[in-house]
Structures are given as structure tokens and as C-alpha cells.
């Protein structure tokens, strides 16, 4: 994260790790940042994927299988 703080892949992974550790609000903020970066890239497919993860976080359900 220190080397590439604006990499949406890293942010998504970090958000999921935070979420697993119970840091829900920080995880949601981090996932939102990843989505914002994707919107700048106009990556519609990834945006939809990350938004699903975000909704799971907001709902308090597992983001992993």
C-alpha cells in the first residue's frame, strides 16, 4: 500500500482484510476509494464487482467464500 496507494486492486484486497478483521467502517471507506479510482478508469465490469463487495460490507455479510 505504501508503494502504490492508488492501486484499486490493492485497495480492494486491503478493504477485505480490514473487513475480516472487524474494521467495518475503515473497510467500507477503503472499498469506496477503490470504486472511485475505477470510475476514473471507466472500468464498468470491475465497478460492479466492487460495488457488490461494498454492499456485502454494509449489510454485514461475508465478502469471501
Image (tube, helix red, strand yellow):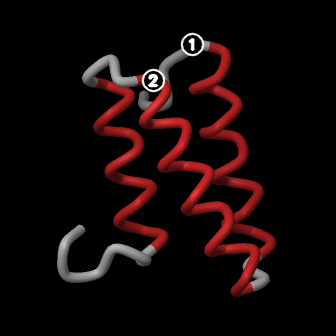
The foreground one among 34 and 52 is: 34
| Image spot of residue 24 (x, y percent) | 45, 23
Q: Is residue 10 left or right of residue 47?
A: left
Instruction: Determine which quarter of the picture holds residue 21.
Output: top left
Neighbours of disc 1 within 10 Å: few (<14), some (14-19), many (20+):
few
> In the displayed structure, would residue 59 be above or below residue 49?
above
Q: Which residue is situated farthest in the left direction here?
A: 2
For label 1, the SS is loop
Q: Earlier in the sequence, mark 1 or mark 2?
A: 2
Which residue in the protein does label 1 denote?
60
Q: Which mark is residue 5?
A: none
| Image spot of residue 61 (x, y percent) | 56, 15
Residues at marks 1 and 2, CA–CA distance in whole angstroms: 8 Å
For label 2, the SS is helix
Which marked residue is nearer to the observer: mark 1 or mark 2? 2
Q: Is residue 4 left or right of residue 25?
A: left
Neighbours of disc 2 within 10 Å: few (<14), some (14-19), many (20+):
some
Residue placed at 43% from the left, 35% from the top?
26
| Image spot of residue 6 (x, y percent) | 43, 77
Which residue in the protein does label 2 denote?
24
Q: Which residue is situated farthest in the top direction here?
A: 60
Residue placed at 43% from the left, 31% from the top?
64
Residue placed at 61% from the left, 39% from the top?
53
| Count of all numbered marks drawn on residues in the image | 2
> In the displayed structure, would residue 28 be above or below residue 4?
above
Instruction: Determine which quarter of the picture holds residue 1.
Output: bottom left
| Image spot of residue 50 (x, y percent) | 63, 52
Report the quarter where the C terminus lies.
top left
- CB atoms of marks 1 and 2 within 8 Å: yes
Q: Is residue 8 left or right of residue 45?
A: left
Residue placed at 75% from the left, 74% from the top?
39
Amino acid at each position: 500500500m505504501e508503494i502504490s496507494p492508488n492501486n484499486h486492486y490493492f485497495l480492494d484486497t486491503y478493504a477485505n482484510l480490514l473487513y475480516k478483521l472487524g474494521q467495518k467502517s475503515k473497510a467500507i471507506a477503503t472499498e469506496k476509494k477503490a470504486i472511485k479510482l475505477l470510475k476514473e478508469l471507466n472500468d464498468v465490469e470491475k465497478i460492479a464487482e466492487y460495488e457488490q463487495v461494498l454492499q456485502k460490507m454494509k449489510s454485514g455479510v461475508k465478502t469471501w467464500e
